[in-house]
Image (tube, grey):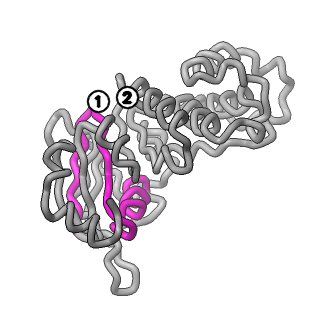
Amino acid sequence: MVADVILEAQGLTKEFKGFFAVNNVNLSVRRHTIHALIGPNGAGKTTCFNLLTHFLVPTAGRIRYNGRDITGSAPATIARLGLVRSFQISAVFPHLSVRENVRVALQRRLGNSFHFWRSEKSLDSLNARAMELIVSVGLAEFANLPAVELPYGRKRALEIATTLALEPEMMLLDEPMAGLGQQDIKRISALIREVARNRTVLMVEHNMSVVADLSDTITVLARGEVLAEGPYETVSKNPQVVEAYVGTGHG
């Protein structure tokens, strides 16, 4: 295992009744980089994500994180090791305020039980850190607003804040730009670039301009297998990649 590789999958395979959603995928994510997983619909991207965080158990293959074999570990165990999947583990509570949502995530990192029955005062010690995180994702003016009332793009920022509260070493982002308008895409892109300064990010993303702008390395999946890997300039000119996208109606 190369020293600068933080996450590595070897021969990762998932079979569903004779159908290989992911087939013999090898993946190496370097520390402190932004690595994108792309491919046409049905390429196996989300299945691959689910395997890496063990929301699905692989049929075959091994996964190593920071040199440790995590194959077969529970998702919660993997999260405690510092490999956190945003938008899945970090559920947002719609009727709690932005601050309360971040505070709940901070409690989880401390390993405490959720303190819903505790007095407000007993959680005040978490307020300063909660506000630091809220400010860092540009939500200071929304701190007291119930999460359900946040504009859609700002909810994404809150989801990133609750993920950051768990102090991940590596973040997995599943289509962070899905459903966002142009202004929100710019805001969340800038936020991802900022949080990646001292972390590793692996993301599934359909928006190619975002992928081109943010990614150090891109892995292209097609029909459950790795089609190409490298920087955007190289991958985007690969004839097989162009054919895979054009052949399925994607530009």
Q: Looking at the image, which is closer to me, 73 or 204?
A: 204
Question: In the image, is residue 177 above or below residue 120?
Answer: below
Q: Residue furthest bottom?
A: 18
Picture residue at 33% right of the left edge, 67% below the top: 43
Residue 94 lies, in percent from the top left, at: 76, 43
Report if residue 86 lies within the magenta region: no
- Looking at the rendered structure, which numbered label has been put on residue 192? none
State which tag comes first along the sequence, 2 or 1: 1
Q: Looking at the image, which is closer to me, 192 or 56?
A: 192
Q: Check disc 2 and report its element: helix, strand or loop.
A: helix
Question: CA separation, marks 2 and 1?
Answer: 7 Å
203 displayed left or right of 112:
left
Q: Check disc 1 and report its element: helix, strand or loop.
A: loop
Number of callouts: 2
- Looking at the rendered structure, which numbered label has been put on residue 196? 2
Question: In the image, is residue 114 above or below residue 251?
Answer: above
Residue 113 lies, in percent from the top left, at: 70, 37
Callouts 2 and 1 close, C-beta under 8 Å: yes
Question: In the image, is residue 49 above or below residue 141?
Answer: below
Specify the quadrant of the image occupied by residue 67. top left
Q: Which residues are magenta?
A: 24-53
Picture residue at 46% right of the left edge, 42% below the top: 84
Specify the quadrant of the image occupied by residue 5. top left
- Looking at the rendered structure, which numbered label has been put on residue 32? 1
Residue 21 lies, in percent from the top left, at: 35, 73
Image quarter hosting the C terminus: bottom left
Picture residue at 16% right of the left edge, 46% below the top: 230
Image quarter hosting the N terminus: top left
